[in-house]
Amino acid sequence: MSKISKNTDSTQIKIASHKGKLGVLLPGMSGAVSTTFIAGIEAIKKGLGRPIGSLTQMGTIRLGKRTDKKSPLIKDFIGLTDIKDIVFGGWDIYPDNCYDAAVKSGVLKNELLQKLKPTLKKSSPMKAVFSQQYVKNLSGTHVKKGKTKMDLAEQLIKDINKFKKDNKLDRLVMLWCGSTEVFLKITKVHSTLKSFEAGLKKNSKDIPPSMIYAYAAIKCGIPYGNGAPNLSADVPALEELAIENKVPIAGKDFKTGQTLMKTILAPGFKSRLLGINGWFSTNILGNRDGEVLDDPWSFKTKEESKLSVLDSIFQPHLYPALYSDFYHKVRINYYPPRGDEKEAWDNIDIFGWLDYPMQIKVNFLCRDSILAAPIVLDLVLFLDLAKRAEMFGIQEWLSFYFKSPMVKRGLYPEHDLFIQQMKLKNTLRFLKGENLITHLGLDYYD
Ligand SMILES: NC(=O)c1ccc[n+]([C@@H]2O[C@H](COP(=O)([O-])OP(=O)(O)OC[C@H]3O[C@@H](n4cnc5c(N)ncnc54)[C@H](O)[C@@H]3O)[C@@H](O)[C@H]2O)c1
């Protein structure tokens, strides 16, 4: 059992020091999210930008009663790795260095990238574990060869150990920022660690690259997170390995853009008991992620992730009169002229008092990778914190960052952004032996 369940007496959990160098390993290192994250951190280090959107850098946490007026910055309260101590590494199917990849991604302005060029040119991805079978719309040359999937996992483990040694790192975190793989279901191969390892040796088709990276990380004792909707570490076998090796894991699918808006709006409608007849969501997106999602099987993985959100917020089984019969549709259309600057439209048909209908329209012109980069940073720092605090297995308190939060089998995920935020902050309070905040004021009885 994790230590987390034992802190009932307001004692502080022992957390190892956050000092020293932290290696961040990104499968998908040349993609839009990874390069916006890496270039963003380099820009922030040089004072050329601000970490907007990052809870670990800008967020505060209230401690004690409101009258205590104690709200330190989260990073000062809990002790997180300084961004100056982060070293980047990763893998991609394209060999471009980080500067060239960031230019190609077209998210950040050239004027900023020019100033970061000498630093960004120094990092390049290692050869990837990849097969087009799992991402139909991509083909790359910077790819490892191996007789079996176990061979490939062992090559990744060698990469990890070399990266750690070469950069004199104290700790590591791995976060999947690679493309969305085709839709796969959990099968027998994924059911136990033994069957999974046998599957690696037998080249099971049920094991895509993202699972091989997850296996390599967890095997090395490295926290692993998944920013895409494909299963990756979300299978019993890898959860078993994470528990055995005392490794924290989290996923899936960064909660940005349209789904972020959904999980902000839907809890509000539900709180006021407003009914829903339909929620139609469509997007146009022109980056490489959009191109990958143009393949129906990669889209299916994304669709499942996006669709799951509303049901779990509205709880139709508890509120059948309001939510048992609403129509939910999600579409993503690849439209190259927009690049990373996605546009999302939502039409929401709601009903109120005496069933009178109303409509809400949301038009979000967002920048996908600009919304994802601070999430990558927070996840890296919090997964490292989890490891230092000896928390292991699925880290549900990080659901705040995901569209399809991983939960223990048999439990349903929490999608409401505000409950997720409370869970995250209360976990931090708990780790430091502070009182949890329930917002229950009992002063009426004083
Ligand atoms: N940007 C967002 O707001 C957002 C939100 C939620 C989820 N995501 C997910 O995050 C991931 C990254 O998004 P992006 O916009 O950077 O996409 P991207 O297409 O720009 O980058 C993905 C990168 O992964 C690489 N890649 C694919 N398979 C690989 C493998 N097996 N090993 C190593 N590299 C591999 C590709 O070559 C590419 O460089 C996608 O799966 C996307 O669906 C992004």
Image: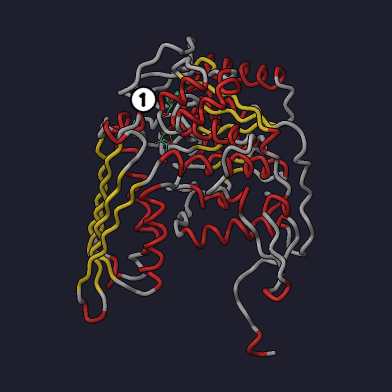
Compared across the picture, whether 423 is left or right of 141 comes to: right
Horizontal and vertical percent position of residue 62: 66, 65
Task: Please say if 283 is above or below 107.
Answer: below
Residue at 66% x, 90% y is: 445
SS assignment at label 1 = loop
Q: Is mark 1 within 8 Å of ligand 1?
A: yes
- Between residues 205 and 446, which one lies in front from this camera angle? 446
Task: Please say if 128 is above or below 294.
Answer: above
Horizontal and vertical percent position of residue 110: 46, 28
Q: Return the residue at label 1.
A: 134
- Between residues 65 and 192, which one lies in front from this camera angle? 65
View extreme (front): residue? 111
Q: Residues within 10 Å of mark 1 (few under 14, many from 20)?
A: many
Task: Please say if 154 is above or below 334.
Answer: above
The quadrant in which the C terminus is found is bottom right
Residue at 61% x, 52% y is: 58
Residue type at tag 1 = Tyr
Horizontal and vertical percent position of residue 173: 62, 33
Q: Quadrant of residue 245?
A: top right
Horizontal and vertical percent position of residue 224: 57, 35
Compared across the picture, whether 423 is left or right of 280 comes to: right
- Between residues 402 and 396, which one lies in front from this camera angle? 402
- Between residues 440 and 62, which one lies in front from this camera angle? 62
Task: Give the quadrant of ligand 1.
Answer: top left
Compared across the picture, whether 177 is left or right of 70 comes to: left
- Number of marks: 1
Compared across the picture, whether 149 is left or right of 338 comes to: right
Task: Please say if 147 is above or below 260.
Answer: above
Q: Quadrant of residue 239?
A: top right
Say if residue 298 shows up in the picture: no
Residue at 57% x, 62% y is: 422
